[in-house]
Amino acid sequence: MEYREQPSRQQGLLDAYERLLARTRLMLDLARDANWPELLNQEIVYLKQVEQVASRDNAQALDTEQQARQASLLEQILENDLEIRQRLINRRNELGKLISASQRQRNLSHAYGVPAPSPTQPVDPNLSKRAP
């Protein structure tokens, strides 16, 4: 009986890694599409899956073939994770530039007494013209 349960537990562990890989592929697609809100939602699910796999992984003994499969899955998961992280860093940098530009605009507005346009209001072209 013990012999039959062990292979199914081992396969269950590899299946869990397969699900993690599928989740990272989905997250990578979301990052490539710049769907940041849904990416964050998927990140929460991903972290829960990682915790579950980690708790199962410590107790499982895999044979050589299964270890090779696990290593391959982990490599793919980590490659996806690396690209996701790089895209998040790029997004953070973009947001930082937008914030800096907004702060500069606000500072200029305060310095010259011209109200800064709100993001929803068009800029008045007459404000940028110099008096003759």
Image: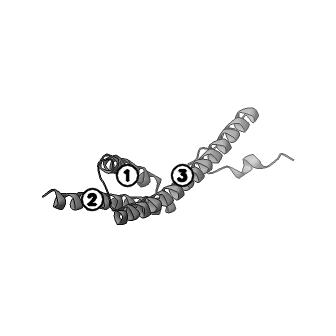
Element class at badge 3:
helix
Residue 88 position, x and y percent, is: 54, 52
In front: label 3 or label 1: 1
Q: From the viewer's perspective, tell me whether residue 100 is left or right of residue 41.
A: right
Residue 109 position, x and y percent, is: 70, 37
The residue at 76%/48% (across/down) is: 128
> What is the distance, in whole Å, between disc 3 and disc 1 at their CAs?
16 Å
Q: Which residue does the numbered mark 3 point to in the structure image? A: 88
In front: label 2 or label 1: 2
Q: Are marks 3 and 1 in contact (CB under 8 Å)?
A: no
Q: Amino acid at mark 3?
A: Leu
Q: Amino acid at mark 2?
A: Gln
> What is the distance, in whole Å, between disc 3 and disc 2 at their CAs?
34 Å
**Which residue occupies the extreme left position in the image?**
1
Residue 89 position, x and y percent, is: 58, 50
Name the N-terminal-most of marks 2 and 1: 2
Q: Is residue 125 visible?
A: yes
Q: Is residue 34 visible?
A: no
Q: Amino acid at mark 1?
A: Tyr
Crowding at dot 2, Cα within 10 Å, few <14 / some 14-19 / many 20+, comes out as some
Name the N-terminal-most of marks 3 and 1: 1
| Front-lying residue, 100 or 45 | 45
In the drawing, what numbered circle is on residue 57? none
| Front-lying residue, 121 or 70 | 70
Q: Which residue does the numbered mark 1 point to in the structure image? A: 46
In front: label 3 or label 2: 2
Q: From the viewer's perspective, tell me whether residue 113 is left or right of residue 73.
A: right
Q: Which residue does the numbered mark 2 point to in the structure image? A: 10
The residue at 67%/38% (across/down) is: 106
